[in-house]
Image (cartoon, grey):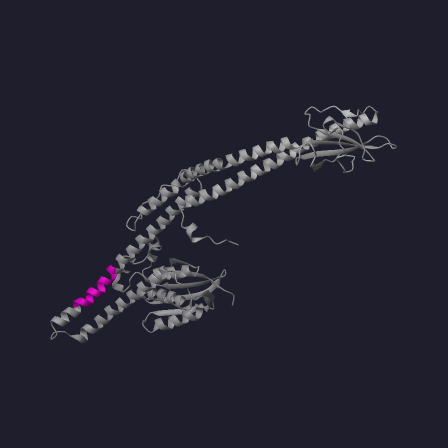
Amino acid sequence: MRLPVPAWWARRSLRLRLTAAAALMIAAALVGAACLLVVWLRMSLITGLDQTALQRAQVIAASVDTDSLARVLPASGSGDTVVQVVDTRHVVRSSSANLEGRPALFGFPPTVSGTAHSVHGLPLSGDGTWRAVALAAGDKDDPVTVYVAVPTAAIDHNLAQLTVGLAIAVPPAVALLTGVCWLLTGRALRPVEALRAQTAEITACDLGRRLDPPPADDALGRLARTLNDLLARLDVATRRQRQFIADAAHELRSPLSSLHTQLEVAVRHPGSADWAARGPALVEESERLSRLVDDLVRLARLDARPRLRMRPVDLDEIVFHEVRHARRHTSVVIDQRAVSAARVYGDGDALARVVRNLLDNALRYAVRRIEVSLGVRDRAALLVVADDGPGIPVADRRRVFDRFTRLDGARARDTGGSGLGLAIVRDLVVAHHGHIGIEDNDPGARIVVRIPATDA
């Protein structure tokens, strides 16, 4: 689960946030390490005290076993160790000089391993803490217990000094490391700032510029290359859009100029205007203009990547309907006998537009006959529209799918084409995950469309 980030914190700079996070982690690490050091050092020193007391107790127990125990035991090397040898009646048999004449001070039972206990309130140190061990000694008839205690005052004093020293040293260390993190973060983010500055200088009129990627192949280098790729795609898209606008303006100029000229002549010379003669030409120019505007709108929608209404569609029914519609406006023979059932997953209106544009293109250049075939092959619907016209040279078979492309000779503007029909077909076929290509028909051209088929 992602925790919400306060708005005031999100508005801070990335450098400040990274440095603050690093400072918190450094402080937590140093404080934790200092606490662990103090705890570990205390445990180590206390263990050493316990071993010292145990060794002293073992020496005294050995003296008891050999009947060589003195009434007053000599002082240890440090002079602050206390010893008492107590019998079962809690009578002190022997003690260290600093406890001479005092009653039994310890009451915990002895253990074989000599486990140490923390005791308080011994008369030599007030409320100080001691580490004491107890060992059994003597024979069965006269058992005694050897108690040895060692003070922890020196350890507590040293650890207190160490704690104070760490408390004084940790804040400057955190501040120093935070400053280093601030400098390193600024150095690490410097290439990002450079990329940001270069990106800010790039405008819509200067998309040909590119960013300077860092030499290292790291995240920043990959980011710079990704931004350069994005700029390249934007440059291509912008150039394509500008070319599209220029071509559209050029194409619209011709029918608009023709309409404007004829209407201007009719307005200036109303008595000589023969509307019966001019009417068909005006209607033809307006229809051509309407088709061109319709194609431009459809291409703009395709560039916007609209969502197609995808569903199972019987492509053969679309072909039969479009062939019937095309036969009403031409005397060219359209043979559809090779059309068989084929179902695809797509947009019915878009697929109808594909078939209609292919038929319009074939009708524009066919001499006597057009053949339309449809079938399923290798899990793909194969649609073929073939004409017996002049054909398309091999070198131009990819170029004819570009927008506003017309070939020389028979395929020119005087045939009524805008150069957008096959471009629309290509974009719609690609949107259906299909493929379109051109083959020889000898004579003429065969346009082949493959679209993935669905199960019946």
State whether residue 173 is above or below residue 7. above
Q: Is residue 104 magenta?
A: no
Number of numbered discs visible in the structure rendering: 0
Apparent side of residue 366 relative to residue 4 in the rendered image (left or right): left
Foreground of the two, 328 or 81: 81
Q: Quadrant of residue 158?
A: top right
- The secondary structure that most of the magenta stretch takes on is helix
Foreground of the two, 269 or 340: 269
Foreground of the two, 234 or 186: 186
Q: Which residues are magenta?
A: 249-261
Q: Quadrant of residue 91?
A: top right
Where residue 256 appears, as percent x and y from the top left, is 21, 65
Q: Quick check: can you spot residue 446?
A: no
Where residue 269 appears, as percent x and y from the top left, is 11, 72
State whether residue 325 is above or below residue 51. below
Apparent side of residue 382 relative to residue 356 in the rendered image (left or right): right
Q: Residue at point 84% right, 30% down?
A: 138
Q: Quick check: can you spot residue 229?
A: yes
Q: Residue at point 56% right, 35% down?
A: 163
Q: Is residue 255 magenta?
A: yes
Toward the right, the furthest residue is: 141
Where residue 207 appears, as percent x and y from the top left, is 31, 48
Where residue 42 appears, as percent x and y from the top left, is 63, 34
